[in-house]
Image: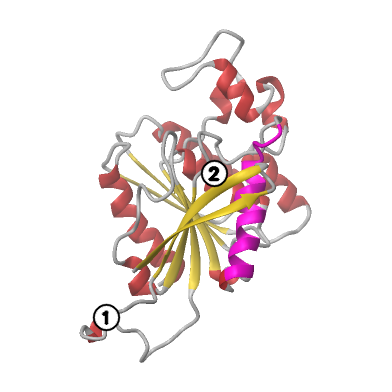
Amino acid sequence: MARLLIEYFSNALRRTTSFEMMLPNDARADLPWENTAAAPKPMSTLFLLHGYTGKAGNWVPEGLPEKYNFAIVMPTAENSFYLNGEATGTAYQTMVGEELVDYVRKTFHLANGPEDTCIAGLSMGGFGALHTGLAYPDRFGKIGALSSAYIIHEVAKMKPGEGNDVANYAYYRSVFGDPETLLERDENPEVLVRKLKAAGAKLPEIYLCCGTEDFLIENNRGLHRFLEAEGVPHEYRESKGIHDMVFWHEYIAKIVEWMFG
């Protein structure tokens, strides 16, 4: 597995930033079961999003890129929820969903269409995968959201001076915008779903999962109910687990097989 660290100037962020990339194109000649040259197929691409306080590359589906022949693109997006903030230099949605996809296309000739481009993430990255995929259905064909931090309804009720164990009101306002109008704006994935349906557009395929002991389980059940009510086909899975890598490693394998198998 070839691993790259790439620095480039991001116009969305108005600064130099970096992302990591993994390419399963260095199979060992002395291990025939690692050599896929006998049965070549076009390489797909997975944009893999980290969680709150995380960074690029702090979780990787080991062995799966070689098995299913896909590259992994891993941006670092701070604690942005992969949304465009109001301040200059905080356009993380644009950076991931537009700029980075275009860069990978131009530089590596990958991610050329939604049929071979997927996006997945855990926790904050689960929200980011869902939102980014719905914001750019012409770029991402499948979405995997693991233990998604689907907290829009909680944030929408926050008032100045409030917060939770994760962050305060000022942080949530800087990320999501005015909480009072959050549920009506495109930062809310539910708004994106309804817009795509109204336009008769094709939605990306969606896979949601969450552990039954996860503190975000009710948030994910609410998202599942919303998609059911809107008639949006999707996979939804629950099983024993908490908000940790044990659950995420189990389910990223299932999601990758669903995406590329």
Q: Is residue 101 visible?
A: yes
On screen, residue 108 above or below 193 = below
On screen, residue 4 above or below 12 = below
Which residue is rendered at x = 43% and y = 87% of the image?
Answer: 40
The tally of labels here is 2
Which residue is rendered at x = 48% and y = 38% of the image?
Answer: 124
Residue 216 sits in quarter: top left
Q: Real-space Cα distance between discs 2 and 1?
A: 35 Å
Viewer-nearest of labels 2 and 1? 1
Q: Which residue is mark 2?
A: 128
Which residue is rendered at x = 21% and y = 83% of the image?
Answer: 31
Circles 2 and 1: CB atoms closer than 8 Å: no
Start-end of magenta stretch = 88-107
Viewport quadrant of the C terminus: bottom left
Coordinates of residue 104 in the picture (x, y in percent): 58, 64
Coordinates of residue 9 in the picture (x, y in percent): 63, 51
Coordinates of residue 197 in the picture (x, y in percent): 72, 52
Q: Is residue 26 left or right of residue 173?
A: left
Q: Is residue 122 left or right of residue 134?
A: left
Q: Is residue 231 visible?
A: no
Which of the two residues, 239 or 48, is positioned nearer the viewer here? Answer: 48
Q: Which mark is residue 28?
A: 1
Tell me the amino acid under the disc marked 1. Arg
Query: Which of pointers 2 and 1 lies earlier in the amino acid sequence?
Result: 1
**Regarding mark 2 in the picture, which secondary structure is present there?**
helix
Is 103 magenta? The answer is yes
On screen, residue 157 above or below 239 = above
Tell me the amino acid under the disc marked 2. Gly
